[in-house]
Every structure is written in C-alpha cells, then in structure tokens.
Image (cartoon, rainbow, N blue to C red):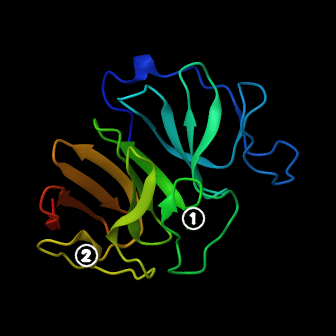
Amino acid sequence: VALLPGSAEAAPTLSWTVGDPAGLASGAVEGTRGVARCSHPMGPFVDPTTNDVVVAMHTSRTIARISPVGRLNTFAGQAFVTPAAGAEADGLTLDATFMGCICVTVDTAGVTYCAGYLAHNVRQITAGGTVTTYAGSTANTLGYGEHVSDPLQALYTNPGGVVTLGTKLFIAESATAGRVRQIERATGATSNV
C-alpha cells in the first residue's frame, strides 16, 4: 500500500540507517536522523491527522512514528517481545504485543490499522491509544471466511496490506490467498472486492 496521493509532500525526509549496519541485530533505536535506526521497516503511511510517517517495524514487532521534524519514536508494541501463537496482547499502545505487522494505515479520525501477516489478522489502534484485534483470528488461525456483522469471525490468510477509504477498510491477502477483502466499518460486514 503506497502513500495516499498528495500526502507525500507532507512527509519528512527519511534518512535513517535501516537495520543494523554491523549485523548485530540490535534492532530499532529511537531518536533523530543520524541516531535513529529502523528494524525492518515496512508499509509506511502518512497519518493525515498529524503528518507523521507511521511505519511497521517487522523485526522488532512494533509500530513507529516519524514526526515531520524527523524524530522516530515507538508508537505501539513491546520491542522484540514475540507473543506465543494466538496470544497477542491487547491494551494500551506500549503494553500491546504484535506477531509481525507489515503494513499500516491511518484514517482521518486518527485510527491506525495494522496488517498482521503472521497472525492472520488486522489490529486496530484507537486515537486514544488502545490496541485490539479488529478483524480475523485472535487465535492465529488462517483461512477464508466472511461474516455478515463481526470482522473477528472472518478468517484471513497472511494480510499484507491495509488501507481505509471512507467507511471501508480494504485488506490485501498475500501469498496463496490472492484476494482483496473489504470491511464495512459501520456494520462489520466483510466481503471480497
């Protein structure tokens, strides 16, 4: 999922070291350009409410924000904490855990969605800072199944991209699934596009 048209102008100039140049796998480091390091960054998206670049840090299992002045901070997740299969922790942003988010999107109300490729789900972070599983399995179950009113009852296979458009959330499933799904956020109804 790419940056929305017109949003790239508001993005800061990104010039961080990606990964650990020494190969020591020390992971993400918060800070400003020249100090901060990303840990396998994936799926960047510009938050339309703050102009921050929101990035999934796949290896450290966190989500980071890069401010318009170039400061990188952990926004959600516990760095390098790997939850057991089906045991992602919900809660406040820095108390939550992620299996491996690879793409993020933020809607116009400041709600962040994360494609949980390894957990076969989509996580939601409210503008108030609460993380929950929004769609798909809470038990790391992959599959295919739609549901008329509860996105948690629908099954997904390796969601690799998410984006919002109006009242809909679109989810691209990767690998063998090869499909794009949509959730009508007002009703929770899921269907193929």
Count of numbered labels shown in the rendering? 2
Q: CA distance from mark 2 to mark 1?
A: 21 Å
Residue 48 occupies quadrant: top left
On screen, 2 above or below 163?
above
Residue at 71% x, 24% y is 33
Asked if residue 128 can be seen in this view, the reply is yes
Quarter of the image for residue 108 reads top left
Quarter of the image with the C terminus in it: bottom left
Which of pointers 2 and 1 indicates the residue nearer the eye?
Answer: 1
Direction from residue 71 to residue 103 in the image, left or right: left
Seen in the picture, residue 116 relative to 51 is either above or below; the reply is below
Task: Name the residue rendered at 48%, 66% in the picture.
Answer: 90
Q: Which mark is residue 97?
A: 1
Q: Split into 4 quadrants, where in the image is the N terminus?
A: top left
Q: Which residue is mark 2?
A: 154
Secondary structure at numbered mark 2: loop
Residue 175 in view = no
Frontmost residue, 93 versus 115: 93
Q: Position of residue 77 (x, y in %)?
A: 58, 56
- Residue at the spot 48% in from the left edge and 29% down from the top edge: 52
**Residue 191 location, x and y as percent?**
15, 66
Q: Position of residue 182 (x, y in %)?
A: 20, 59
Q: Are marks 2 and 1 in contact (CB under 8 Å)?
A: no
Is 9 drawn above or below residue 126 in the view shown? above
The answer to which of 133 and 4 lies nearer the viewer is 133
- State the residue at coordinates (30%, 77%): 155
